[in-house]
Image (cartoon, helix red, strand yellow):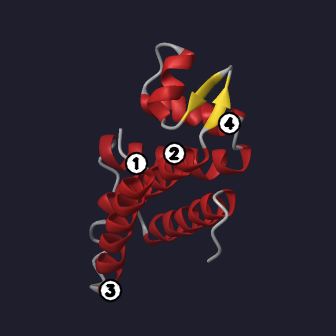
Amino acid sequence: MPSSDQHTKQATHNEGLLSLLQQQARHIEYGDWFVTVAFYAALHRIEAMLYTKKYVVRGSAVRHSSDARKIWGSLSDHGARELLMKQVFSALYDPYVTLYEMSQIAKYSCHLHSEFDWSRAVSLLELIKKMCDLVCGKSG
């Protein structure tokens, strides 16, 4: 399982791609990938937070969504992470699930996202990043 630093590095890498697409005005053309990369940047921010804070759920330590998956049984990592957000980090639940659903639509419904969608994805990612930093005691 990757460390907090590795998750943070991957999130920063993904955010760099988002910035590059925006700088080159390609974010609308590749809106489907833009939204998907924004979701995965958020996912890595959340995983870094989990690893840093080491939460206890149902008597078990949770440092990664795969730990939560073991607690709840047959859920995927995404499903376990979503349930963890709902039960432990309720403020992160709506932005996380919204980005997840946007990425699912982009990947599987061949939906090219509009300018509104990518700007919403950026806003949701920034909100998740700020909340994770707050939980981890980082200022920014």
> Seen in the image, is 86 located left or right of residue 31?
right
Task: Please tell me which residue is depicted at 50% across the width and 69% down the height of the picture.
Answer: 122
Which amino acid does the dot numbered 1 rest on? Ser
Given residues 65 and 128, the one toward you in this image is 65
Cα separation, mark 1 vs mark 4, equals 23 Å
Task: Please tell me which residue is depicted at 35% across the width and 52% down the height of the picture.
Answer: 111
Which amino acid does the dot numbered 4 rest on? Lys
Q: Earlier in the sequence, mark 2 or mark 1?
A: 1
Q: Which mark is residue 86?
A: 4
The answer to whether residue 28 is visible is no
Q: Mark 1 near mark 3, Cβ–Cβ under 8 Å?
A: no
Cα separation, mark 4 vs mark 3, equals 34 Å
Which amino acid does the dot numbered 2 rest on? Tyr
Residue 110 lies, with reference to residue 118, above or below; the image says above
Q: Which residue is mark 3?
A: 23
* Number of residues whose C-alpha sits closer than 10 Å to that of mark 1, classed few (under 14), some (14–19) or many (20 or more): some
**Percent x, y of residue 60:** 61, 23
Q: Earlier in the sequence, mark 1 or mark 4?
A: 1
Element on which disc 2 rests: helix
Q: Earlier in the sequence, mark 2 or mark 3?
A: 3
Which quadrant of the figure has residue 61?
top right
